[in-house]
Amino acid sequence: MGRYAVLLPGDEDAWEASSEEERQRVYGLHERFAKLLEERGHQVTGGAELAHSRDARTLRRSADGATTVTDGPYAEAAEQLTGFYLVETDDPEGLLEVCEVLMDGEDVIEVRPLAAAADGS
């Protein structure tokens, strides 16, 4: 079975400013997405909505080997990773079809295969 990350980049500030009604509409899309995944034999093995990137801490190693910790995300960008799903499936094209359900609440969705682990899993 292949393993995939469904990555959800988005505008965190727009989400934060959205109404409760809009948030509930989008959460409903995610519930429908999860139900369709299960019905079509895809297995969700993990995932979460992420807190705002302003709450992130980033570690960087400098050329001299020292590590610095800074507040905020790794990349300064209008869009940040806002959530993700981990999915196991034998049908990656079918996974893409189910991901279309989320397009009523997301501008972009990235589906990326996970690299094989050293233990072969």
Image (tube, rainbow, N blue to C red):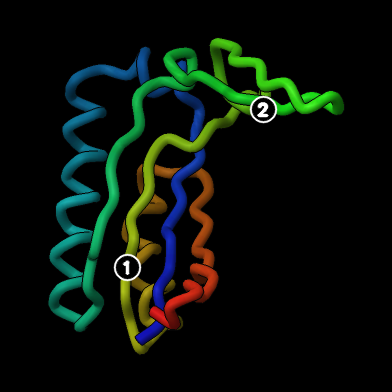
Residue that appears at 59% across and 15% down = 69
Percent x, y of residue 46: 26, 56
Amino acid type at mark 1: Val
Q: Residues within 10 Å of mark 2 (few under 14, many from 20)?
A: few
Residue picked out by circle 1: 87
> Which part of the image, by quadrant, shows the C terminus?
bottom left
Q: Quadrant for residue 15, please give it.
A: top left
Earlier residue among tags 1 and 2: 2
Residue that appears at 39% across and 63% down = 100
Please determine whether, in this image, residue 81 is positioned above or below residue 99: above
CA distance for labels 1 and 2: 26 Å
Please determine whether, in this image, residue 29 is positioned above or below residue 25: below
Residue picked out by circle 2: 75
Residue that appears at 33% across and 81% down = 89
The residue closer to the viewer here, 17 or 91, is: 91
The residue closer to the viewer here, 115 or 2, is: 115
Image side of residue 58 versus residue 64, left or right: left
Amino acid type at mark 2: Ala
